[in-house]
Image (cartoon, grey):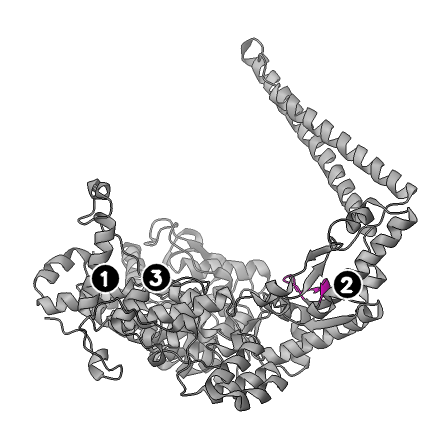
Amino acid sequence: MKFSKAEVDAIIEASPRTFVPFNKLVLSEDHQARSATAPVMSLPELAASIKDSGVLQNLVVVQAARGRYEVCAGGRRLAALTLLVQQGDIADNYPVPVLVVPADKALIASLAENCFHVPMHPADEFAAFARLLAHGKSVEDVAAAFGVTPLIVKRRMKLATVSPQLMALYREGGIGLDCLTVLASVDDHQRQDQAWAGLPSWNQRPEHLRQLLTRGEIESDTDPLARFVTLKAYENAGGPLRRDLFSDDDRKAYLLDPALLERLAADKLGKRAKQLLSEGWKWVDIRPRFAYDEYVKHGELRKPRRAPTPEEAEALKALGSRIAALHEQMDALVDRDGDGDGDAGEGVTGASEANDAADEDDASRDRAFLALESEADGLEEERKARLEALTEWPVAWMALAGCVLHVGADGRAAIKAGLIRPEDRADLAQAITKAAEQKSAGGGSSEGDAEAARGSGLPALQSLPSAAGATARPVHSEKLMRRLTAHRVAAIQAELLDRPEVALAALTTHLTLKLLADPLHGAYRLPNLLAISATGNQHELRGAAEDIEASPAAQRIEADRIAWIEHLPKEPEAVFDWMLGQPPQTVQRLLTFLVASTVNGINGTDAGRPVNDGLARALGLDMTRWWSATGEAYLQHVSKTRVVEVVHTVAGAKAAGPLAALKKDAAVAQAEQLLAGRGWLPDCLRVQPDAESPATGGEAVDANDPARTEAPDCA
């Protein structure tokens, strides 16, 4: 039922506006167009607005018996007024502006008010809050006027400062509020726009957007180093940070100076390091973040345990006996629990009483079991503490060993003790053997001492690499190998985009190996049109190399992917018909792109022949066009010895010599300059020529050719 504007105006014109005391108003049961089950906004916010500014929109009422007025439009305002009266903020005879309408027009007026009401867009609300504060209102005043917390006002203010382009997109429904709040957490409009523009359409999730915006920043509540230093200490040191108003934890912040954070952590660890040195350790290294690669050549001692005194042995024996007895009692309770089923008794009443008794018995057993378990756990902790007290570092060992003081994953200071430098291995072996022989000769050797004297005389070593083992350490860590091979895969994909004949050969080879290598494979019939599975590996590339998105190869692939998506039909069922209508060249180019997207070859080790080596040779892959050995890409992730070795290979001994005396960061910076433009590649990125491979006849393609970045030419 729709009413014209003339009808509504006539109703309003014939109805007087007046004020009615609050205590004369009641909610109408017959003339309300809105149901009682309709969603209700926050009444405290509305009540706060009425308290601050009064009732800005009159209620629509019908005159009733005994001087009362029934409210047929404005139920929420009436409920908010009721809340204010109950809180004592207004009197019960507070004058309320009303529009009095005839009873036969009441339902029309109620329906018209709700139908013609247009809610404010949230973007307008954000802008209005910003204007209030710009006109001199304080955050607290605005918060009180609208019944919200100051934090909510600050959040709406922050949303009002989002980039105009993003706000316009939000008004059009092109971006959700969840993503808008993430973008509003940073103040730079250009950074906001770039982050949203660089977000792929298939992954426009606030979590992914937050990762992009906070890359390189340190979260104060999750990073172990930040928790160890504390946010307060970082701020007192002048450390720059960014707070996220939209975080559930208002104390959360993003720290922007990692170098300062590590220096503060090292300073805080320094006092404990002096204490460790005073205890007798030969050396103590301070490492805010422990790196296992730095100590892979070090041996690691096992902390020995002395024989307990008679009193200590008796206490340990008593603890063991008591723990065993508790476990026996717990097992007995479990066995009784399985034998509790029996006859319920005769009749319904008897069965009910039996069930109640059984339930009570079960509850009693549970309580007893938990009490025994708690006691056993407590005694077990006591036994562990007593055993730990029996372990101690021999002074002779400490004089040859050291420890690394670092921040653990729990945000507390942690000690990696008993490490042996390679040059101290021989002295330590001699000291351990000598101590064992002395105790054995004296007749007072314990079981541990006898074991120490057995074999090579080095059983106390938990890990002690030999000289041969030390030199066998891989040049590249697993993480770096995955990073480098990910760049190799991306480069092969980018090269393959312009070589459809190689893509077709690769696809045919894949299908041949799948279907013809074993005839049984061809017997399987899946419900799909074609029994071919394919998986793009872009997600795996990003996981293996965090810098992959900035590489020329990945950017080329992403540009083609976006172009193809724009040309394909939006409905999946229309793709096949669309494909039939395309020129063969277009289908071939699309197939080439799809094959390129599936190229594999990320590997964590530097051994063996790469799985994509044949494909790389067929393409004439030259990784110097797609990757260079910068500090970020390579030099920071290998040892300084490796950095010097690479420079020596490329620029000679005269250039490499001075690097050995520099600290790692300085050596990396200078090496990066020396390697710039030299085209050096680690072995895992090189393509070795295969004399037996036939020529592909492929035409060489210039990576800088504009045709390589054009959108697909689709009919």
Residue bearing mark 3: 611
Residue 322 visible, this orientation? yes
Q: From mark 2 to mark 1, how far is it between C-alphas?
A: 57 Å
10 Å crowding of disc 3: few (<14), some (14-19), many (20+)? few
Q: Position of residue 133 (x, y in %)?
A: 50, 81
Q: Quadrant of the C terminus?
A: bottom left
Residue 415 lies in the magenta stretch: yes
Name the mark on residue 506.
1
Q: Quadrant of the N terminus?
A: bottom left
Type of secondary structure dominating the magenta stretch = strand
Mark 3: amino acid: Val
Pick whichever, 689 or 604, lies toward us.
Answer: 689
10 Å crowding of disc 2: few (<14), some (14-19), many (20+)? many
Q: From mark 1 to mark 3, how far is it between C-alphas?
A: 12 Å
Name the mark on residue 383.
none
Marks 2 & 1, CB-CB < 8 Å contact: no
> Which callout, 2 or 3, points at the residue further toward the start of the chain?
2
Please identify, in this view, whether the residue under mark 2 or under mark 1 is nearer the observer. 2
Task: Indicate the secondary structure of the residue bearing disc 3.
Answer: loop
